[in-house]
Amino acid sequence: MQHTSCTEDRIQHALDRCLDGLRHSPTSAHRWDVLMCSVGQSMNRWSLEELVKRDPDNSIILLHQILRKTKEVQERCQYELVPALAIMFTSTLLQTPYCAPETELLEKAMEVFRAFITWPEPYCSVCRNLLSTLQLEMKAPGISFQRLVREEQDLNTNSQASKTMTVLLMNSSEVPADFLSVAEQLSCVEHSEKDTYITLIKHAFQSTLGTKYPLCTIHATLQAKDVVELGEMFSTISAVLETAAAMTDPMESRSHVIQELELLRERLHIPASSGIKSDGMLQTLPIPTAKCRMFHWEKDNFDVLNTLLEHDQQNLTLKEDEDEVDIEDDEGHDTLSMVSESYAPSFNSGADSDFFEDSDDSISSPKPAKSPARLSQHLYRLLRKPKRSLNRAKSLGYTESKDFSVVREIRSNSLPHHVQLRSPEPSSCQAPQNETVRQVCFRRRPILSCDEDEKSTTLRVVVFGADHVAGKLARAYNSLRQKESTCPRLSRTFNIQFYFMPVKRDSPEGQIGVASPTPKGLNDVVSLNGSENSTNDIAHLLGMLDPWYERNTLSLLHLPANIVCQQTSKTESDSYDSSYEQRLPILADLVLYYCRYAARPALIQLYQAELTLASGERRTEVFVHSLELGHTAGTRAIKAMGTASKRFGIDGDREAVPLQLDIVYNRVVISGRNQYKRESKMCTSVNLTKACKNPEELDSQLECLQLSMTDVLKRQNGKSKKSYNMHMSLTEVKVDKVQISGAAETTFAVCLDQDEKKVLQGVIRCDVSVCSKPDSSLDWRQRRAEMSAQIQPLHPKFCSLLCLPIVTFSGALP
């Protein structure tokens, strides 16, 4: 008894440490202290899980402690802790060996977390996912574990064919060698089908019957079977669990599972239980490592992912004949009713409710010609299936709706509900005389998705890098949506989700390490002669939007690489089954935890730069973090030359040749009024950076860029000496639209997202604005009565804002 009390105290203290200091959007003055504190706390969640693994009873203790803490959070209205507690309960429940029905633990959890259904987004959605999981577990114990492993290990059954693929995108020049080693280890882990089947069958018996039958006896019996027999048993168990999950009465469904497992036990000739006492002991069965593939990612596209299709051309052909691609619509829960019977576990893809969405969007795309036999089969499938709307992947943000249905608004802080493009069109860029031109842009869902039926495949795309890699991700995403809009391939087959792992890009000498906390913010001028040539502001933005991302993804990487990437020892416990487990570094656990339990994307606004070159060529580029112009961009181009750059030398701003520029911009102010301004300046550099350094800059109505202009006030011109800039000043202003052009045939260089490979020379004009797609198919007059009078524009123009969806644990907190 004393030992149990001591264990409860240890688990309680460990849980409190996990949540300690977890607060959303601290003030800028205290953010540095909070970040440094989080560095030491980033290991607490991993340490807590290691503690729970030592004894199966520890899982039940932790679940009770989480419920206790959740009640406190509800009483104190500590909103920011709700997602963390719900996710921790889900992950702990997933790995709990057995939850006895007589304890009514799941019923208590339902009662506790049901109270948060009336809370604002994203708290209600996070809890709704957990409630759905609890409801399923009460009817079919262990089904969440079974589904996750089945999908990650690609174990298709007669009734279930969904799977989850995890892809790690890395560039050897942008991540530490230790990171590459861990990724290679993850991609090389393989569990035999036989071991996986045995684990899942043992798990089904234990999660439903507890210690009634010794696992060692079940294991020995299963070990004697061949893989074909085991596969048939697993298919039978999967069908039993899915049938139970579809039932309405939990007691009836649980009885159904027990009855079917007893029949299977008789087939296996496992001795019946005496019924007097338990014949076995609980064992913790770890989740098998997910199947991962690593790709060396060099270009600004996702062509490397096409190899995933080449491995299964036959299945791809079948998919092309069957279901059309449609929009992911997980967020479509308008009422605060009780969770539906359909399964929506927290480790599946979630939906961000932070957008406006058309409910009846569809497009057409070219279809290959079918033979008469295949065409008749296709028609037969359509006729025998219930009629439903066939939608294409609006996820690409490229298609327009022919039918504009009622627009639903759900609160968001990651992006504005509408953006007022206050400045004039780029072609004229003249200030309006006696009227205010306003355009209202509604966000259309940007997530690449496919039919979310039982046969859909989820593709987790995990990207490692700093802000320059986030820029490459944005350009690849934009390229993909353009390709898929005309000829869907990846989006037809996969429900694509993007995950971002921040990595620090170190000194010019090529040393690379994990991200380290730095007080330098977005508004600071980047010093290319310093030790840092790429920031991690996008990752910090995600951390501000989602504290659990900061704690478990961003903050952990502040630890030295040798700690994050070191091999961990196996759990020493008789009640822990480590027979098939391959212990991996902490980084691998971090990646898998992020992929499994992060369920809601945060939408990061993209921007477009319309560039005019001296040759007359015009091109449009996309960026997500920054655009550098002039000396800063030129210096990056020199650095990209490698050892050859030593012949050119790298000058500072004082030695840089100033540029005569005409700059037109629209200043963003809280009042929302236009502050249009035109200036002629002598500048060495003009930089545009996403304004998201401080929490107050995340206001949904103030999506903007920080414009930094390095002005030359006085320049020393000498005949015998090299000319230099004597007096300089830095002007900063928040803008939402900018036009920069060179005066008197002045040309300049432009660099996107701090990426030396994306430097364009000989530019004479650059127009920057929020990245959007006008929707000409909408008639404002038909919908004027449906829109609020406060946002009716004088010259209405609907458009879809293009956003980069990066998956986080809870999405953007309010």
Image (spheres, helix red, strand yellow):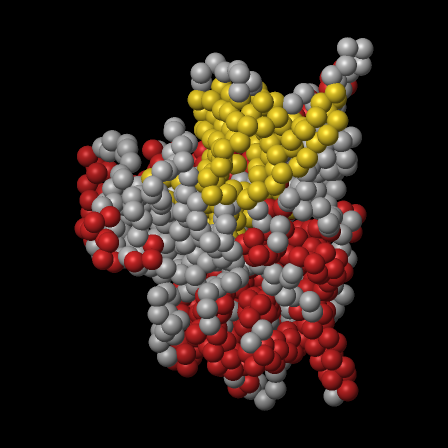
Q: Is residue 805 visible?
A: yes
How many numbered marks appear?
0
Query: In this view of the protein, which residue sits in the foreground, 365 or 601?
Result: 601
Q: Is residue 566 visible?
A: no
Q: Position of residue 468 (x, y in %)?
A: 61, 37
Query: In this view of the protein, which residue sits in the foreground, 632 or 555?
Result: 632
Q: Residue at x 41, y 43 (%)?
A: 422
In this rendering, is residue 687 above or below 501?
Answer: above
Which residue reaches farthest top?
A: 719
Q: Position of residue 241 (x, y in %)?
A: 43, 68
Q: Residue at x 66, y 37 (%)?
A: 730
In this rendering, is residue 526 above or below 602?
Answer: above
- In the rendered image, the quadrant that contains the N terminus is bottom right
Query: In this view of the protein, which residue sits in the foreground, 340 or 468?
Result: 468
Q: Position of residue 566 (x, y in %)?
A: 77, 50
Residue 224 sits in which quadrant?
A: bottom right
